[in-house]
Image (cartoon, rainbow, N blue to C red):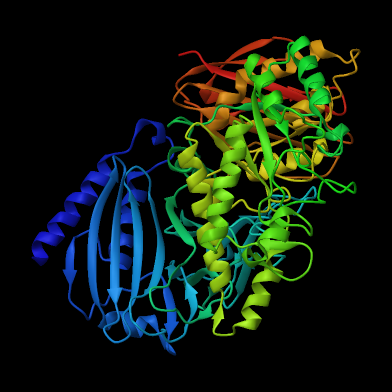
Amino acid sequence: MKSLAKLFFFVCCCLLMAYVPKASAQTVRTSDIKTCNQWIKAKLGGPSQGKQVSGSSVAYPFSFIYNGKPSSELLSHWNIIRTVKKLDRNRQQVTLSFLDPKTKLEVRCQTVLYNDFPVVEWIVYLKNKGTNDSPILENIQALDTKFSRQASTIPEKEFYLNYNKGGCSDSSDFKPLRVRMDPDSSKTVGSFWGGFPTAENLPFFNVEWKIKNQNQGVIIAAGWPARWKVQFKRDNIQTLSALVGQMHTHMLLHPGEEIRTPLVALLFWSGDLTNSQNTWRRWMIAHNVPRQEGKLPKPMLEASNNAFFAEMFYANEDNQKQFIRRYIEEKIPIDYWWMDAGWYPNKGKDWQDLLGTWIVDKTRFPNGLKAVSDYTHEHGIKTLLWFEPERVMQDSWLFVNHPEWLLGQGNPRFLNFGNPKARQWATNHIDSVLISEKIDLYRQDFAVFSANYWDDEDTAHPDRQGITENKHVVGYLQYLDELLRRHPKMIIDICAAGGKRLELENLRRAVPLWRSDYAQQPVGIQAHSYGISSWIPFSGTGVGAIAPFDFRSEMCPSMLLKGIDVRNKNLDYALLRKLVKQWRMVAPDYYGDYYPLTPYSQEKDSWIGWEYYRPETGTGFIQLFRRTNAPEESKTVLLKGLDPKSEYKLIDFDNNQIVRISGRELLAKGMKFTLPEKPQAKLIRIEKIH
């Protein structure tokens, strides 16, 4: 049986290494898939199926303490069941199930293996299958593993940690960070502010090192729409330890009760750091960005009048239709009409008055929001509607009628998705609003300090620390999944006071159309795009002015025309139509590879720029920005990702000038761009000729 299992694993490895799809050929190496498979075999025992006897010596990549004992001492004495299930052409699921013969605690590691990318991911579930409360589970780590390199005292051969700031709502959002992990050093990163998962940092980390002068590394990603913590620790020789887990876990489980860890994904790479990020982007696009009826979402142009009516606090049916009509008259081809906070009743103070009363204010919308949707649909425009179901204000319908579903005692309170009745009500009620008002895109916001409510529960129940948060996460994800199941044509927009919930579980279900509450500031938005694009292929922000520098600074896969008052008929609509047309021409290439062409900077005396390129289509574009105080009139940049054997034409969208040049020259010598004005933005189309 052992020889058959080894043969099965060998065949699987061969198949995995042999199959690299065309779309990934530029960045996925067969050697990296081999490295990933070797890691899987060492840490998870390979994909063979059946029952395994106790006494396994596999160093599993997760850990916990149970009844005072570390899992490394326990799991080797528990029987293991391994099952294998094919999910689709490129993925298989391998589940390892451990059972404690004494207390009947089941530990289930549900792993997904990819055969088109050097990626493995897993979630660990822990369930009490006994008839009594379990002993205490604590310090549960979804990832607990080590990475080694060759021993060296050369600083360049040390471990380096690359990661990004989160969405803290200022110009530094998504700033790239790089830390050298010297011997005996450590680094802890997490969601330590307010319970917002990505207010401080994105939960994506690229660890790099050198082996025999070759760059090598692993990307570590976490999916947990609550509080997570990542710890890196260097020893004094050649090893880096990595831990990923929910921030607080110290709990017993009642009979039949189950919890889960954060999702962890690892991507193994070698060679170039930028190419490793493009392998990540391609994996995100191939397997993570949510689909509409099986297709990737198209680039989106939205419009709203929220900037002129205190979101929708002063909005009504007439002024909604007035703005939509003006966009139609000016032939601005918007895809969605964006209806934000404030469409429900209020007490006269602001749009936050009665969060938790999710019914249309019939005083301002006597025919419901359906009247607005019907009007947009007549003109081929869809509608988007904002909700924030977790925040519940005093005197709202939920506050008065179902306090048992809410956490906290003050104002606001917190709708607990861990309560099945609360989750079911929210699902059915919000679904009914989407249907009755004919809404095409659901916008989910989250601007409440959830940590306060979870901490209160932990204090009140010291042997159940982390359980309320854990169950809320599970219920929240079930809520999103059910809405998507009921509305397969719908996209969800994930907003959390800007970009404060941009982790892998949310990004598999939603796209961030409003990635930061810091918006319509061109230099800051340029910096946002520079940083976030390495990790998140589809994101959006707002456009505040009809001007090339502003518009191009705010270009991304989703753009909201937010600060434009179309009631003013004297605006330069011809220029706006031109800029939108140019964006439409290049926008499909946002699904290509991304290459920074300059260093990151927020300073006004610098240039910044990047390139997108799709080898599959031979198309892409360059964006360059000369800021207000940048002294240099010209800059030469080396392009990336092109075929050196091919010829390309570069089209300047400002003057339609075309330059034909070889890929080899663009890669080796680069291209000189002159921007005589300050500030100025350049948009260049790349097209492969042959």
Q: Residue furthest bottom?
A: 68
Can you say which quadrant of the picture contains the C terminus? top left
673 horizontally vs 9: left or right: right
**From this viewpoint, is residue 207 visible?**
no
Camera-side residue of 91 and 599:
91
- Horizontally, residue 426 falls left or right of residue 288, namely right
Name the spot of residue 122 as percent of width and height, x first. Answer: 40, 60
Q: Which residue is rendered at x = 50% and y = 69% of the image?
A: 242
Task: Depth check: give the residue in front, 166 or 619.
Answer: 166
Q: Where is residue 124 shown, x and y percent of the image?
A: 40, 66
Q: Is residue 259 left or right of residue 490?
A: left
> Residue 653 appears in which quarter of the rendering?
top right
The answer to whether residue 85 is above or below residue 359 is: below
Residue 186: quadrant of the picture? bottom right
Does residue 473 sit above or below 337 in this rendering?
A: below
Whether residue 332 is visible, yes or no, is: yes
> In terms of depth relative to the viewer, which is nearer, 305 or 244?
305
Q: Is residue 626 above or below residue 229?
A: above
Image coordinates for residue 383, horizontal then vertical, percent = 65, 28
> Could you tell me which residue is drawn at 79 percent across and 31 percent down?
562
Q: Is residue 174 left or right of residue 602?
A: left
Task: Look at the image and tell me in which quarter the N terminus lies.
Answer: bottom left
Q: Position of residue 89 (x, y in %)?
A: 28, 39
Name the residue at 51% across, 70% down: 243
Q: How many marks?
A: 0
